[in-house]
Amino acid sequence: MENILDRPLKILLVEDDAVDVMMFRKTLADVDVPNEIKLCRCAGCAKKALVEGDIYPDVIFLDEVLPESSGSEFKEWLDSSKFKNIRVIRLTGSPESIKDPGDSVLLVKPPTVRTMSTVLQLVGAIQRVAQAAASYAIVSQGIH
């Protein structure tokens, strides 16, 4: 699959289950999208990685069931922080466990290669549009 970004896609995976992590990485490899992935096994680790600048991801894949706090609680924190514009893909083994996904995309684990490919293409396209809009804003500010 062609990467529509001019750089690797930055992914933050928040998942505590080792088997799910392995399957996610395999699916991601099968999609063949250049990426940088940071794994956090709990919401606290993910918050720390974001706040300390370890990663500013294009997308967060967020499990619902995590140690210490839920994916929903992490998403609430994210929405009230300076990171609220990062796209979030919610991962769950049982979709009924997420009462209100809000503006998140919801994927049932494990995602298929086709589904992952589609999601990553959309994330890449959104990032490309955001880059173009930012460039346009900079250029148009210089024109009077």
Image: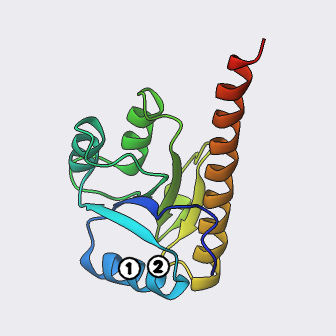
Does dot 2 land on a helix, a strand or a loop? helix
Q: Spatial distance from mark 1 to mark 2, Cα to Cα?
A: 5 Å
The answer to whether 70 is drawn above or below residue 106 in the figure is above
Q: Which residue is outermost to the top?
A: 144
In the picture of the structure, the residue carrying the numbered disc 1 is 25
The local crowd at label 1, few if under 14, some if 14 to 19, many if 20 or more residues have their Cα within 10 Å, is some
| Marks 1,2: beta carbons within 8 A | yes
Tag 2: residue type?
A: Leu
Whole-percent x and y of residue 61? 45, 60
Residue 132 sits above or below residue 10 on the image: above
Q: Residues within 10 Å of mark 2 (few under 14, many from 20)?
A: many
Q: Residue 48 or 9: which is nearer the viewer?
A: 9
Check residue 9 in the rendering and tell me which mark sits there, or answer none. Answer: none
Residue reaching furthest to the front: 143
Q: Give the answer, above or below, for where 47 lies relative to 64.
A: above
> In the displayed structure, does residue 66 sit left or right of residue 10?
left
Residue drawn at x 52%, y 76% as measured from the top left: 33
Where residue 4 appears, x then y in whole percent?
64, 65
Residue at 42% across, 60% down: 11
- Rendered location of residue 107, percent (x, y): 56, 67
Farthest right residue? 144
Three-letter residue code for mark 1:
Arg
- Quadrant of image for the N terminus: bottom right
Vertical relation: 72 (above or below) 65: above
* Left or right placement of residue 29 versus residue 99 in this view: left
Nearest to the observer: residue 6 or residue 117: 6
Secondary structure of the residue carrying tag 1 is: helix
**Figure quadrant of the C terminus:** top right
Residue 57 image position (x, y, % from top left): 42, 51
Q: Residue at x 65, y 36 (%)?
A: 135
Residue at 53% over, 37% down:
85
For disc 2, the marked residue is 28
